[in-house]
Every structure is written in structure tokens, then in C-alpha cells.
């Protein structure tokens, strides 16, 4: 399959409710290079995601299996920085905050507006958020 087509397909799968979509380079039979498409969906979205893959790729079949996962409780907060507000995702386990992660798109938008690198804005936001949420 032309790899340019993955971009559109991945976007459509996310719109259908996919939790994650990614490709992995692999070698198929007869040492043919290929890309394995992995899509994490809820059970109720399996049929529609499979149909999207069958219609939107060159594959003749979709393999699927149940996957279990453990996730942190999450909440979102906005923090003020010297460049503006940035949303942060807070990961919580047993009422303990384990992670504070700035939202990339907010950092990207602010970086562009202020002609800064995204990593600079990200680090600033993370530093500010840690002062607020992690004691």
C-alpha cells in the first residue's frame, strides 16, 4: 500500500473512536517489507473500524484480539504561564498525582504565536504545573 494513504486512514480511524493507531515496519513472507497497522478500539467500535480498514487499505483481512489495559485516573486543568493558558493532563493512582503532562497542541499554538520552540513552552508548562499539582 502506498504509505501516503496511512495519514488519511489514521485520521478517519481516530474520528470513528479509535483510542490509538500506529504502524510498525515488518517483514512478511518471502521477506517482503510491509507495515503492520495496529488500531486500539473499544469492542463496540470493532465492526466499523474493521470495515474502514478493509475499504481503505490493500489488506484482505483484519486480525483482532482482546487487549486489557490499566490506566491512570485522569483530570484536565488549565494553568497560567507567562505566555498564556495551557491545558495539562494529570495522571492519578490511588489519589496520588503521578504525572502532569502539558497538552502538546496548546504548547504548539503558543510556541508559534511567540516564536519559541515547542519544547521550550512544554518545559515551562510542565515546570509550572509540577509546582501547582505535585507537592
Image (tube, rainbow, N blue to C red):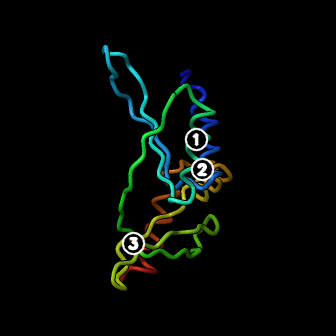
Q: Please give the residue where the numbered disc 3 appears in the rendered image.
A: 72
Q: Residues within 10 Å of mark 3 (few under 14, many from 20)?
A: few
User: Do tag 2 and tag 1 residues touch (Cβ < 8 Å)?
Assistant: yes
User: Do tag 2 and tag 3 residues touch (Cβ < 8 Å)?
Assistant: no
Q: Nearer the viewer, residue 103 or 23?
A: 23
Residue 81 lies, in percent from the top left, at: 57, 70
Q: Earlier in the sequence, mark 1 or mark 3?
A: 1
User: Do tag 1 and tag 3 residues touch (Cβ < 8 Å)?
Assistant: no
In the image, residue 110 above or below residue 98: above
Q: Earlier in the sequence, mark 2 or mark 3?
A: 2
Report the disc number at residue 10: 1
In the structure shown, which secondary structural element does the residue marked by tag 3 occupy? loop
Name the residue at the right extreme: 113
In the image, residue 81 above or below residue 110: below
Report the disc number at residue 14: 2
Q: Nearer the viewer, residue 5 or 104?
A: 5
Residue 110 lies, in percent from the top left, at: 63, 56
Q: Residue at x 36, y 16 (%)?
A: 32
Residue 117 lies, in percent from the top left, at: 54, 48
Dot in front, 1 or 3: 1
Q: Nearer the viewer, residue 10 or 54?
A: 54
Report the disc number at residue 27: none
In the image, residue 32 above or below residue 41: above
Image quarter of residue 36: top left
Q: Nearer the viewer, residue 135 or 45?
A: 45
Dot in front, 2 or 3: 2
Instruction: Please give left or right for residue 5 compared with residue 98 in the image.
Output: right
Amino acid at each position: 500500500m502506498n504509505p501516503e494513504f496511512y495519514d488519511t486512514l489514521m485520521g478517519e480511524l481516530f474520528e470513528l473512536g479509535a483510542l490509538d493507531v500506529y504502524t510498525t515496519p515488518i517483514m512478511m513472507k518471502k521477506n517482503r517489507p510491509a507495515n503492520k497497522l495496529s488500531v486500539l478500539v473499544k469492542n463496540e467500535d470493532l465492526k466499523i473500524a474493521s470495515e474502514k480498514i478493509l475499504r481503505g487499505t490493500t489488506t484482505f483481512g483484519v486480525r483482532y484480539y482482546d487487549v486489557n489495559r490499566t490506566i491512570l485516573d485522569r483530570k484536565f486543568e488549565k494553568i497560567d504561564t507567562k505566555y498564556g493558558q495551557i491545558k495539562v493532563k494529570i495522571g492519578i493512582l490511588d489519589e496520588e498525582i503521578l504525572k502532569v503532562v502539558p497538552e502538546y497542541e496548546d504548547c504548539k499554538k503558543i510556541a508559534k504565536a511567540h516564536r519559541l520552540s515547542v519544547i521550550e513552552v512544554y518545559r515551562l508548562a510542565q515546570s509550572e504545573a509540577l509546582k501547582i499539582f505535585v507537592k
